[in-house]
Image (cartoon, rainbow, N blue to C red):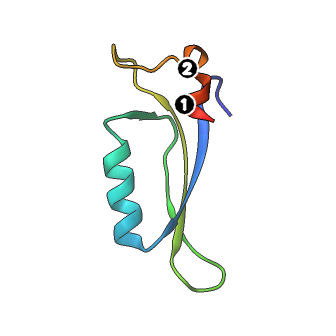
Amino acid sequence: MTEGTVKFRLIGDRPDITAMINALDPVLDIVQEWRIYPMQNGTGVRAYLEARPQPTDATVDVASHPEEHE
């Protein structure tokens, strides 16, 4: 895992997974190529992402507001 990144596992239907990744793309810097895999039980699909926040002026400082992010 790259320093400063978080790994995500998305589970759902293929169109929902694709829509979620497209929604996250402007907010997160996705640092590895992602692929969609079928679920082993045959219901839905999953995708694995590794990402870090995009640098912006609107970044929330979790350390200054820990009670809001627990």
Mark 1–mark 2 CB contact (< 8 Å): yes
Instruction: Give the secondary structure at mark 1.
Output: helix
- Compared with residue 14, is residue 66 higher up or lower down, i.e. above or below? above
Q: Position of residue 47 (x, y in %)?
A: 53, 60
Rendered residue at 55%/84% (across/down): 43
Q: Where in the figure is residue 55, as x and y percent of width and height? A: 40, 18
Residue lying at 55% horizontally and 20% vertically, measured from the top left: 65
User: Circle 2 sits on which residue?
Assistant: 65
Expressed as whole percent of the image width and height from the top left, the position of residue 42 reads 58, 86
Q: Please state which amino acid type lies under the numbered disc 2.
A: His
Give the labeled residue for mark 1: 68
Q: Is residue 36 left or right of residue 2?
A: left
* Picture residue at 51% right of the left edge, 78% below the top: 44
Corner quadrant of residue 9: bottom right
Q: Quadrant of residue 2?
A: top right
* Residue type of the residue flagged with mark 1: Glu
Q: Residue at x 35, y 41 (%)?
A: 25
> Where 46 falls versus 33 (above or below)?
below
Neighbourhood count class around disc 2 (C-alpha, 10 Å): few under 14, some 14–19, many 20 upward: few
**Whole-Å distance between the Cαs marked 1 and 2?**
6 Å
Identify the secondary structure beneath mark 2: loop
